[in-house]
């Protein structure tokens, strides 16, 4: 529920594509997290716990967020038109899913969460074997789905009231938020790398 890049993207995607954007973003996020959970179970935890890796992820992920934020803010600044797609096509759905993966992966706090809190929960669930891992992962993804579906529902039900001007400003401010988060992640990555 922490405000971050995934929330900013979900808001803008829901304004354009409607309710299903939220669950599709979570699907992309879940695909990435399932891959990571699998790798953690296989022993990746020692690699991502490294200060060097965390710093590099911060710099690269932060840079991606700054670029995405700049593009989003520029689109908003140029006063874009809100094209409502109540039934987005397969290509739009795939774009939202892939964006869920990319936005999650470009967030250094996602890696940090998994290297600390997520890994701890995963180790606890490992004590129960496969059923423990499945229960942990399912509960985790369902909580993501509940939150982002709620956000998406709120935005989608109010989007008819969102005119082009409101949508442009929404894009602009979400873009600025991504730029700010990205710059912070880059700065933190450089600071940790310098130490």
Image (cartoon, rainbow, N blue to C red):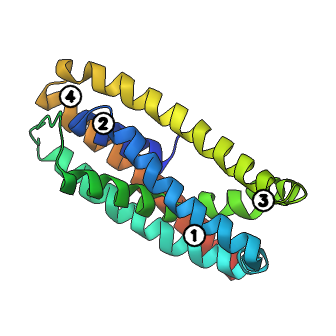
Locate residue 83 relative to residue 137 in the image: left or right: left
SS for dot 4:
helix
Q: Position of residue 162 (x, y in %)?
A: 19, 23
Q: Is residue 101 above or below residue 145?
A: below
Q: Position of residue 159 (x, y in %)?
A: 23, 24
Badge nearest the viewer, 3 or 2: 3
Q: Which of the numbered marks, if any, corresponds to residue 58? A: 1
Q: Image point 11% across, 41% down: which residue? A: 79
Q: Image point 20% across, 44% down: which residue? A: 76
Residue named by callout 4: 166
Label 3 with label 1: CB-CB less than 8 Å: no
Locate residue 122 relative to residue 142 in the image: left or right: right
Q: Image point 91% across, 58% down: which residue? A: 127
The first of marks 2 and 1 along the sequence is 2
Q: Quadrant of residue 37?
A: bottom right
Label 3 with label 2: CB-CB less than 8 Å: no
The first of marks 4 and 3 along the sequence is 3
Badge nearest the viewer, 3 or 1: 3
The first of marks 2 and 4 along the sequence is 2
Q: CA distance from mark 4 to mark 3?
A: 47 Å
Q: Nearer the viewer, residue 186 or 171?
A: 171
SS for dot 2:
helix
SS for dot 1:
helix
């Amino acid at each position: 529920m922490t405000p971050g890049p995934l929330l900013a993207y979900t808001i803008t995607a829901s304004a354009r594509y409607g309710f299903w954007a939220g669950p599709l973003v979570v699907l992309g996020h879940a695909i990435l997290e399932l891959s990571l959970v699998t790798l953690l179970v296989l022993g990746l935890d020692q690699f991502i716990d490294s200060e060097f890796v965390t710093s590099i992820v911060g710099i690269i992920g932060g840079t991606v967020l700054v670029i995405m934020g700049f593009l989003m803010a520029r689109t908003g600044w140029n006063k874009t038109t809100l094209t409502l797609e109540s039934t987005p096509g397969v290509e739009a759905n795939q774009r939202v899913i892939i964006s869920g993966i990319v936005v999650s992966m470009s967030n250094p706090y996602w890696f940090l969460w998994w290297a600390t809190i997520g890994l701890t929960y995963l180790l606890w669930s490992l004590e129960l074997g496969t059923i423990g891992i499945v229960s942990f992962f399912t509960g985790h993804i369902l909580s993501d789905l509940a939150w982002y579906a709620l956000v998406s529902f709120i935005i989608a039900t109010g989007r008819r009231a969102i005119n082009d001007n409101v949508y442009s400003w929404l894009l602009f401010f979400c873009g600025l938020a991504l730029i700010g988060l990205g710059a912070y992640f880059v700065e933190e990555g450089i600071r940790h790398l310098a130490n």
